[in-house]
Image: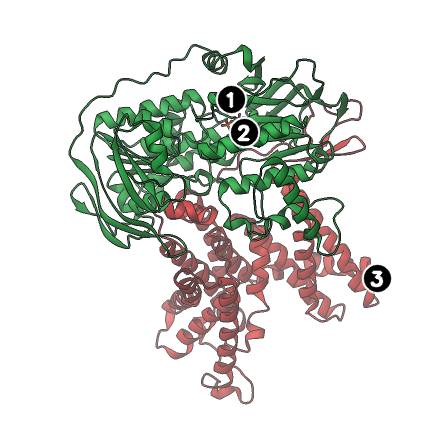
Amino acid sequence: MKQVGPFRLDTGEPSGAWTLVVSAAAILAAFVAAGGIFWAYGLNPIHAYAVIVHDTLLAPGAFPEIFRPTIPLLLAGVGLVLAFRAQFYNIGAEGQLLAGTVAATGVALFTPIRGPATLPAMFAAGFVAGALWGLLPSVLKLRLNVNEVITTLMMNYIALYFVSWLVTGPWKGPSVRGFAYTDQFPASAWLPLIPGTRIHWPTLVLGVVLAAAFAVLLARTRLGFAIRVQGENPEAARYVGIDALRTTLLVMLLSGGAAGLAGVGEVAGVHHKLLDPNQVSLGYGYTAIIVAWLARGKPLATLITATLFGLIYSSGDVMQVSLQMPFRVTSVFNGLILFFLIGSERLLAYRIRWAPAGAPASAPASAVAPSPPSGEDP
Amino acid sequence: MHPASAPSALPSVPPSAPVRLAVNEITKTFPGVTANDRVTMDVRGGEVHALLGENGAGKTTLMNILYGLYQPDAGEIVIDGRAVRIRSPRDAIAHGIGMVPQHFLLVRRHTVAENITLGLAGTRFFLPTRDVERQINAFAERYGLRVDPRAAIWQLSVSEQQRVEILKALLRGAGILILDEPTSVLTPQEATQLFAVLRRMKEEGKSVIFITHKLDEVMAVADRVTVMRKGRVVDTVPVAMTSKSQLARMMVGHDVDFRLPARRPGTGAPALIAEDLWVQSDRGLPAVRGVSVVVHRQEIFGIAGVAGNGQRELVEALTGLRPVDRGRLTLGGRDVSRWSPRAMSKLGVAHIPEERVRMGIVPPMTVTENAILRRYEEPPFSRGPLMDYASATRFAQQLIVEYSIQTPSPRTPARLLSGGNIQKLILARELAHRPDLIIAAHPTYGLDVSTTDRIHRLLLERRDEGAAVLLVSEDLDEIRILADRIGVMYGGELIAVMPAGTDRGTIGLLMAGQRP
Ligand SMILES: Nc1ncnc2c1ncn2[C@@H]1O[C@H](COP(=O)(O)OP(=O)(O)OP(=O)(O)O)[C@@H](O)[C@H]1O
Ligand SMILES: [Mg+2]
């Protein structure tokens, strides 16, 4: 296509390695652009990044903090990957997550279940609640052809205000006076932490297991096959008689359920009560969209992308504490990263090849290996 | 195989006509295949140059290189004596090359004029389509490409869309026009009209590269023909000095005998019975209006008709894809009027759909996955909730060998196969399980002559084994060769059913709506 020095730009299938290079470059560019924000705050960007790297990665006890936001991002993100594979644009992980927090709180405070059964019951209830929250938009889409982007998004607001109402109204704890909380959970509803950290490990394990399970689901199971056919060519799915309603419902049950689990982790592992929705979830359900999108349809890749955004969340804490910047700056970071990633999408179609000027059109030794036929690699 | 026999042979180009376009030693490899292997050919001014070759021979790849969609690994392109690099379609257009791709690239919601204006150089900023409309009308007049500039693309038939693509290329000043299998989507009448357009272009000194699988068309319109086999050029010969059988031999590499085995007389018990069937179109209008028909075991029932007379809706109703509005459908003694596609398929109904890429395959999925698409939830392809990809791969490999599907491996995404090989994959999948009823819409669409012949034999074989076959085709020759009885659809009705051997003229009149 274009000759730049000894390199030639060619079009072709994006390979895995190339995708990684382009994505990393985009993220790097986003960080450079974000440097402008530090500068605007009167901070030296290099100094600011040095502080962030130190305080998030190197300082004693800092590193594990990354995993606190990673956990909900992983669970919600892995669910979204599944939904996106079925071409169901679920923007509603935030609401499904909140539905999970409500169900878990209900079990912890308002049922007689106590002892070792409490946490499993909370997770089960949270999964079901998240799943049900995702169900309505899928039925609306398949029966009445209502755009799921709108409905899932709107369901987020319903969940948000529902939680607000609960914590200021009927569920407001008698012992908390003026605050908008519920009472604190009994000890049996507290998730155990990895000693010396604030990582509620059962939820993290659940996230990793779910990522692996969804990878197997897509690559090895009958349902996974149907999901992929439905997602890649709905017309072909109709032709071979794949039941779109059934497939989408199952996908949304799993997707919403995963987000619901994330909600359980937040109330049982972090807050130990239900409180203002904006404090329970720091926009995890929305950031999970970027997490899932970056994972490009691969559930296991969310392990990496969720950790990346966990790091960004924990840099937000650092910026707040050490640099006196508002925590919301993380949203700017997220926005910039998304912006650069979407901008870089077009570059994926190109490959750089080594083609010295002497032999313009002779057989090129490809600098970036052509992609192998993309099968389903779990 | 069309009645394309042009009224008079075209005046052949004098051998002295200057070479407009030459490709020298073009090579293009994809992972696992050499699609073009040192391809050399030239095209003269005022010439219709046919490109012939088996499925997967590399024709589309070569044209994509000329149009700047692919870069060759080696070799050069020479236009009017100057070596050029074509890096993009924009470059190609600048060099006077236009292409009508096999799958049109038009914006369906926009009008004809808007589509043509898109990317046209030197249009006014305000209301650019006004001028363009005038130009479209002028060109349409000059070449006989009638089309309403203000109609939206989705309202147009396939052949009208093709005219828009041709106009688009001509308005951009194409002196060399590439047509990739233009006639496989056309009725015989439309093909004849297209040839008239090509003739007009030729008279103006333009060059046309014309890809086809139909030898009759080559003989009717081309001046010279280049035959490709397995990525290489076999030869370029003047049409006047060759014959259909010679061309077939060059293409396949050995002598070919396309005489089909004699029809075995006699049919079996009724298999499919449709009684007073009414089916709606996508727009909710009655598309099939009271069709009654019986297809027997050991019978091929051919349905002839110009596209858009209810055939698509009929096929979809018979396969469970479209609800039956009124009437009854019985298969093997059971009322299946309300059955789902999956239930129909379980009952032994195979369906070769009309729109192969849109419906017949899942393009990004592998050949293996597409091979088991129909039966993925049955053993041995899945056991319990798990898929067994090892046996799926074995099955795919078997189909690849049995139907000679050209693919680098069973793990290749289906969208990378050539047009004809995609069709072979669909046929292989649908016929593999010995169905009792085969519903085939244009089964040999885009297939080369020898593969077409093999599919014909296969359908006859399945028929003799006891299957009932419903064959929908616009290709009268195909229907006349294969069908035991021929029905003609017009305006959603089955207006006549005739025995095999009915002459073309009679069928043709019926297709045009002249009731008996
Ligand atoms: N982008 C691609 N990547 C990998 N392989 C490709 C690609 N495009 C084409 N091929 C392979 O190159 C070969 C030639 O394909 P091409 O489409 O040129 O065939 P064709 O002559 O047009 O066949 P048909 O008559 O079936 O349309 C085929 O084996 C095909 O699988
Ligand atoms: Mg082709």
Q: Quadrant of the N terminus of chain B?
A: top left
Q: What's the CA distance linking mark 3 and mark 2? A: 71 Å
Q: Is mark 1 within 8 Å of ligand 1?
A: no
Q: Where does label 3 land, which residue?
A: A44
Q: Chain of mark 3?
A: A
Is there a contact, CB below 8 Å, between mark 3 and mark 2? no
Is there a contact, CB below 8 Å, between mark 2 and mark 1? yes
Taking the spot 65% from the left edge, 40% from the top edge, the residue there is B139
Q: What's the CA distance linking mark 3 and mark 1? A: 76 Å
Q: Where does label 1 land, which residue?
A: B220
B218 displayed left or right of B286 = right
Q: Quadrant for residue A276, please give it.
A: bottom right
Q: Nearer the viewer, residue B458 or B376?
A: B458
B403 displayed left or right of B437 = right
Q: Label 1 neighbourhood size at 10 Å, few (<14), some (14-19), many (20+)?
A: many
Amino acid at the residue labelled 2: Phe
Tell me the shade of chain A: red
Q: Chain of mark 1?
A: B
Q: Where does label 2 land, which residue?
A: B195
Q: Nearer the viewer, residue A202 or B96?
A: B96
Q: Nearer the viewer, residue A228 or B468?
A: B468
Amino acid at the residue labelled 1: Ala
Chain ID for green: B
Q: Quadrant of the C terminus of chain B?
A: top left
Q: Single out the mark in the foreground, 3 or 2.
A: 2
Vertical side of B262 occupied by B422: above or below = below
Q: Locate residue B47, reporting x and y percent.
A: 63, 22
Q: Is mark 2 within 8 Å of ligand 1?
A: no
